[in-house]
Amino acid sequence: MINLAANPGIPREEIVTRLKTELVELLCLESSNAINEETRLAEDLDIDSLGMVDLVMQIEDCFNVVLPTNSDLSTIKTFGDVVDLLDKLDKLRSAEFNSTATN
Amino acid sequence: MHTKPFIDSFPSPDTLDKFYISGRKMWPDLAELKKLKFDRSLVSDELVQFMRSTALNEYGVAHYVRSYLNSYNNDFKLRMWSAIWAAEEYVHYLVLKRMLEGLGEPLTEEDYAGLEKGDFFNSYADYFDSILISPDIDRRMVQLIFGVLQEFGAVIAYTAVSEKCNIPEMQKLFKRIARDETRHFRFNQVALESLCENCSEEERAMIWPQFREIWGNLQMPQEHIEYFSELDMGTDLYTDFWSGEMRSRMIIRMTQYFKKFRQPSATLS
C-alpha cells in the first residue's frame, strides 16, 4: 500500500505505476501496457458507474486516502485525471504535514 | 433440519422512539403551508414537473410500504418503522402538494387515480428477486441496503432541486425535506448495522456484493409503476437536476459506507 495519509510527497511516477497495477487487478487486464495518461476510463477501460464504485474503493484502500465527498468524479475522464486527483490529494496532505511540522 | 433462529433487528424500540421523536419535530408549521403563494414565473416548467412527479411518488408510499412489509415479515420493529416512514413520506407529499397549489399548479383527481391504480408490488417483487445475490441472504438486509441507496438518492434529489429554485421559501422547504430524508437514510444504516451485530461473518460478507448488485441495477420505485413513464415522470426526471458533484457524492458516500462491511466485525467502526 502507498500510504498517502502517513507518508505524503509520493512522486507522480510512483502513483502512476501503482494505479496501473491496481487497474490491471480490478479490470482483469493482461497487462498495463495499453494504459497511459490519455486512456479514457469509460470508452477504453469500460468503467461504468459500478466500475466507478470499485475504482473509488480500490483507490481509497490502496493509497490510504478518503476521497472528499465534494469531489466531482464527472470531471475525471482519463487515467491521467485519476492520477491528477491523487497527486492533488497528496500535495494537500504534504502541505498539512509541513504545516504541522513547522508548528 | 437446522433452521437459523430469528433475531430481531433491534432488541428494544428505543431507536424507533428516537427517530420518531426527531421526525415529529420537523414540521411544526405543516398547517401553515396551506397559505403559501409563489410567483410561478420564477419557477421553471422542469422544476414544476419534478415536483408533480415527486409529490405523486411520495403519495405512492402506500404501494411501497407493502413491499417493505413483505421484506420485513416477522420483524416487528422494522414493520413499525415502515409505518412511521410511510407517514413521514406522506408529509413530504403534503408539503410538495401545498407548494404546487401555491404555484397555481395543483394535482388533479386524474393524477391520483392513475397512481393509485398502478401496480407496484408484483413488479417490485420480481425486481427484488432478481437482485438477490444468494437465496440465503436475509431479505431484511437487502431491503435496508436498498433503503440506504433510495433515501440517500432522495437527499441528493431534494438538495439538487433546492439549488435550482429561485424562491427562497421553496428552497428552505426542499432543504427541510432533504434533511428529513437524511434521517430516513440514517435509520436504514442504523438498522443494517444493528442486524449485523447478530449475523454471521458469512452474512456480513454478503453486504458489499449485495450493494454492488443493487447499485449496478438500481431501479427507483417510480420505475415500477407504469403510470410514471406514461407521464414522462420517470427516474430520469428525478436525477436531471443532479450536478456532477451530486452524482459523485452519491458514488463516494455509498462506496465509503458499504466497503466497511468487507472488514471483519471486530474492526467495524
Image (cartoon, coloured by chain):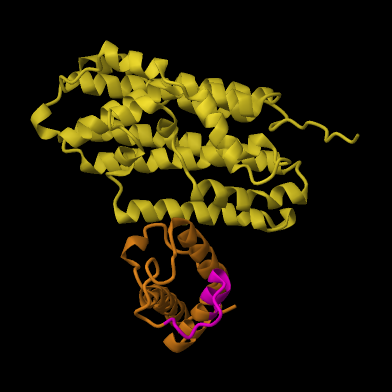
Chain colours: A orange, B yellow
Question: What segment is highlighted magenta in the picture?
Answer: A21-35
- Taking the magenta stretch, the answer to whether it contains residue B59 is no
Q: Quadrant of residue B157?
A: top left
Against B150, residue A35 (above or below) is: below
Quadrant for the N terminus of chain B, please.
Answer: top right
Instruction: Give x and y (percent) for residue B15.
Output: 61, 30
Tell me if I can see residue A98 in this picture. Answer: yes
Tell me if I can see residue B85 in this picture. Answer: no
Who's the residue at 64% across and 39% down the image? B141
Against B7, residue B101 (above or below) is: above
Front one among B113 and B21: B113
Against A68, residue B85 (above or below) is: above
Front one among B98 and A79: A79
Quadrant for the C terminus of chain B, please.
Answer: bottom right
Instruction: Give x and y (percent) for residue B49.
Output: 23, 31
Who's the residue at 64% across and 27% down the image? B72
Q: Quadrant of residue B14?
A: top right
Front one among B34 and B252: B252
Who's the residue at 60% across and 78% down the image? A1
Front one among B23 and B121: B121
B80 lies left or right of A16: right
Q: Quadrant of residue A77?
A: bottom left
Who's the residue at 64% across and 53% down the image? B261
B102 lies left or right of B139: left
Instruction: Give x and y (percent) for residue B100.
Output: 22, 22
- Taking the magenta stretch, the answer to whether it contains residue A32 is yes
